[in-house]
């Protein structure tokens, strides 16, 4: 039975989104929000109790002790479904990484029009991890070797995926003992598909072990490669001023929204939009120029490097079109709703697909080729400009917020210690002293089954009050950005006293935007350095840290969650569990649930749990942080010890008379 229809205020907490949902209702078009209300999820499939891996089924296991036609038990079916999802997520991230490596190769050989190596320092640092000679060599020579090495990781048959050497030694040893060091990215994904074909691997724990191996090939493989190459070609992010929400669209300009994940085309569209040729072309069409904005992780890529505004996160892709002000939405890969094309038919918006891997019926396809990227980017922009004259009525919500993204691992390191003493030690010290209780990475998707942005921002705000430093990527980061949490001054009145002191001393917002979804690897390297810089144990699982994906929906999120668990993190997903089993059959389906939680914790020190209630998520996150603090012998978290220094203290003193200030500061009484 369909659920009751929610009001726009129940569907999203974002006022801009709410305005567009009202608009959708007025003109009678559907969105992911209304479709989620109309379409109840299948309770058998969503609980992981349906097997459709062969033509004898689908087998729906709804009774105790029931098996599939082949005899497969519920736990085997759940494990197979989960590892298939992890593998699809790992494949998506890693294929993105492969394309980035191909672009690096083309740039190194002078075959990629418009691209060049922007961050030679990062190129040298990355190459040095793999003992690629750097001294006395041109950046192109180093890049060529690195591209070859990175491309080889995908088809590698034996050995270990190269970026794994960047993990803490103890962690690598654990993976070795468990026999899950990833050999080659493609090999692990293929093997996952092989093992889950009818009649293969049927021991749930054994199946899930390979799920971990495949996820590691993503986190310490394909995704890390994607981040490295994006930084080398487009620059390692550093703080920059940006804006977020639908109000970044402009009435008097040609609005082009870039949506998807790979920065290769979007970066070139940014470059092309600034050429005199395109500016003149737009003016000739009666517009002031071209206004670029991003959606989803493409938004994060160009926001943190170029300051290009983000029109919104995953659930705002349709809402951008509903403004009537978007001349073209240019998409590449991942998180692109098929519904965009049908929705755009009600407006003048052109949906332009660009990836050889992604076509949508009814969309305009202009295929991207990195060898002539600038030419293609200009062609796309001219098509959008030509479409400006077809614009009808517009409804751009006057809602936008400033933010400071760009907190890459490298920048945080510099920020905490300067050029000559770059270090994470001040962060570690703040954790050790209890000023910062712990660290939470709050990442991942939006899901229309919950209220858009609510879980992300609620969990974030509650943890900030508890002196937990928050790092974010992906759609979660955009949710916080829209709320003003990514601005130092705006966010600080909402955080605990100790965290506030640290943020004021270092000059950072309490929520650090670390990039797109593939950039979750930045969190892995940050955690690794926190271990290396000392005081917090000798492996990632000892750090008082948690990962949360409150509004998860994609298979990529499951891959990320799994590689974080394997790296030692406690990971909490909100919403529905894909391995929950039926509520009245808990005992039967406990095997997989328990294994990915306590089972994985024994093996890796990290665990994966699905927790629907946000307050319970927060409770478990804090309990975990406190338990890790205790295990390290750190000071107990006592917030009352802090908050008497920094800006708060200055404001307090300002309220006093001079005499009272002398008394407060020096214990002097006026004589
Ligand atoms: Ni990641 Fe989810 Fe998509 Fe990015 Fe957003 S939905 S798993 S955050 S845009 S990939």
Image (cartoon, rainbow, N blue to C red):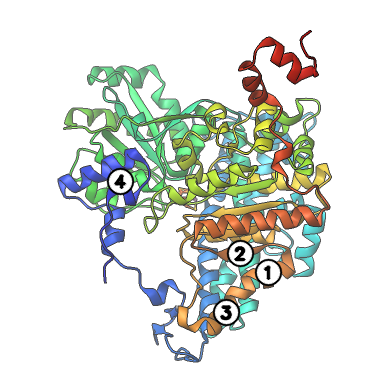
Dot 4 alpha-carbon crowd within 10 angstroms: few under 14, some 14 to 19, many 20 or more: many
Look at the image and tell me whether residue 505 can be seen: yes
| Residue at x 29% of width, y 33% of height | 397
Q: Earlier in the sequence, mark 4 or mark 1?
A: 4
Pointers 2 and 1 in contact (CB under 8 A)?
A: yes
Of residues 172 and 373, the one nearer the viewer is: 172
x and y, in percent, of residue 124 in the image:
73, 34
| Quarter of the figure that contains the N terminus | bottom left
Q: Closer to us: mark 4 or mark 3?
A: 3
- Neighbour class for label 1 at 10 Å: few (<14), some, many (≥20)? many
Dot 2 corresponds to which residue?
Answer: 608
Task: Please tell me which residue lies in front, 527 or 5.
Answer: 5
Q: Which residue is mark 4?
A: 318
Where residue 85 sits: x, y (%)? Answer: 50, 66
In this rendering, would 20 be left or right of 600? Answer: left
Do the residues under discs 4 and 1 have CB atoms within 8 angstroms? no
């Amino acid at each position: 039975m369909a659920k009751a229809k929610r009001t726009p205020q129940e569907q999203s907490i974002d006022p801009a989104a709410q305005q567009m949902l009202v608009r959708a209702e007025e003109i009678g078009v559907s969105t992911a929000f209304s479709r989620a209300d109309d379409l109840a999820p299948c309770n058998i499939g969503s609980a992981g109790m349906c097997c459709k891996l062969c033509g004898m089924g689908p087998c729906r296991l709804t009774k105790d002790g029931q098996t599939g036609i082949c005899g497969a038990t519920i736990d085997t079916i759940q494990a197979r479904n989960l590892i298939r999802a992890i593998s699809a997520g790992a494949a998506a991230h890693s294929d993105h990484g492969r394309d980035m490596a191909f672009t690096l190769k083309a740039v190194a050989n002078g075959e990629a029009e418009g691209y060049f190596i922007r961050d030679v320092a990062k190129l040298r640092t990355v190459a040095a991890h793999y003992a690629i000679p750097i001294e006395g060599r041109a950046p192109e020579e180093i890049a060529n070797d690195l591209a070859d090495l990175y491309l080889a990781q995908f088809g590698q048959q034996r050995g270990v995926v190269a970026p794994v050497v960047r993990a803490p030694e103890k962690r690598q040893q654990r993976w070795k003992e468990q026999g899950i060091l990833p050999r080659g990215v493609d090999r692990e994904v293929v093997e996952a598909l092989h093992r889950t074909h009818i009649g293969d691997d049927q021991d749930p724990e054994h199946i899930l072990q390979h799920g971990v191996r495949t996820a590691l090939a993503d986190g310490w493989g394909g995704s890390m490669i994607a981040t490295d190459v994006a930084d080398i070609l487009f620059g390692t992010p550093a703080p920059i001023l940006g804006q977020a929400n639908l109000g970044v669209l402009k009435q008097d300009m040609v609005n082009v929204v870039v949506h998807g994940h790979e920065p290769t085309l979007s970066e070139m569209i940014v470059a092309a939009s600034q050429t005199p040729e395109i500016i003149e072309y737009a003016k000739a069409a009666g517009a002031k120029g071209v206004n670029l904005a991003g959606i989803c992780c493409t938004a994060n890529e160009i926001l943190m490097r170029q300051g290009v505004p983000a029109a919104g996160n995953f659930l705002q892709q349709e809402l951008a079109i509903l403004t009537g002000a978007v001349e073209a939405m240019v998409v590449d890969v991942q998180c692109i709703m098929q519904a965009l094309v049908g929705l755009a038919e009600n407006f003048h918006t052109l949906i332009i697909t660009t990836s050889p891997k992604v076509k949508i019926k009814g969309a305009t396809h202009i295929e991207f080729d990195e060898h002539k990227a600038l030419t293609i980017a200009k062609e796309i922009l001219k098509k959008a400009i030509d479409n400006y004259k077809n614009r009808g009525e517009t409804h751009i919500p006057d809602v936008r917020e400033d933010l400071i993204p760009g907190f890459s691992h490298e920048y945080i390191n510099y920020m905490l210690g300067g050029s000559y003493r770059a270090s994470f030690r001040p962060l570690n010290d703040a954790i050790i002293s209890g000023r910062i209780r712990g660290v939470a990475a709050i990442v991942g998707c939006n899901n229309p089954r919950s209220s858009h942005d609510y879980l992300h921002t609620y969990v974030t705000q509650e943890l900030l009050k508890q002196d937990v430093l928050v790092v974010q990527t992906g759609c979660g980061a955009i949710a916080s950005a829209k709320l003003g949490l990514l601005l130092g001054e705006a966010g600080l009145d909402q955080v605990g006293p100790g965290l506030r002191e640290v943020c004021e001393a270092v000059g950072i917002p309490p929520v650090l935007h670390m990039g797109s979804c593939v950039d979750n690897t930045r969190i892995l390297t940050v955690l690794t350095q926190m271990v290396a810089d000392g005081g917090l144990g000798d492996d990632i699982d000892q750090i008082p840290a948690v990962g949360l994906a409150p509004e998860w929906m994609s298979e990529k999120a499951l891959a990320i969650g799994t590689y974080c668990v394997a790296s030692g993190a406690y990971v909490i997903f909100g919403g529905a569990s894909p391995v929950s089993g039926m509520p009245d059959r808990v005992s039967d389906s406990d095997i997989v649930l328990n294994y990915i939680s306590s089972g994985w914790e024994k093996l890796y020190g990290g665990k994966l749990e699905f927790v629907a209630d946000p307050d319970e998520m927060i409770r478990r996150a804090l309990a975990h942080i406190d338990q890790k603090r205790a295990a390290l012998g750190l000071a107990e978290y006592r917030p009352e010890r802090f908050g008497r220094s920094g800006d708060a203290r200055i404001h307090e003193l300002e309220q006093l008379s001079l005499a009272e200030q002398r008394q407060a500061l020096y214990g002097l009484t006026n004589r």
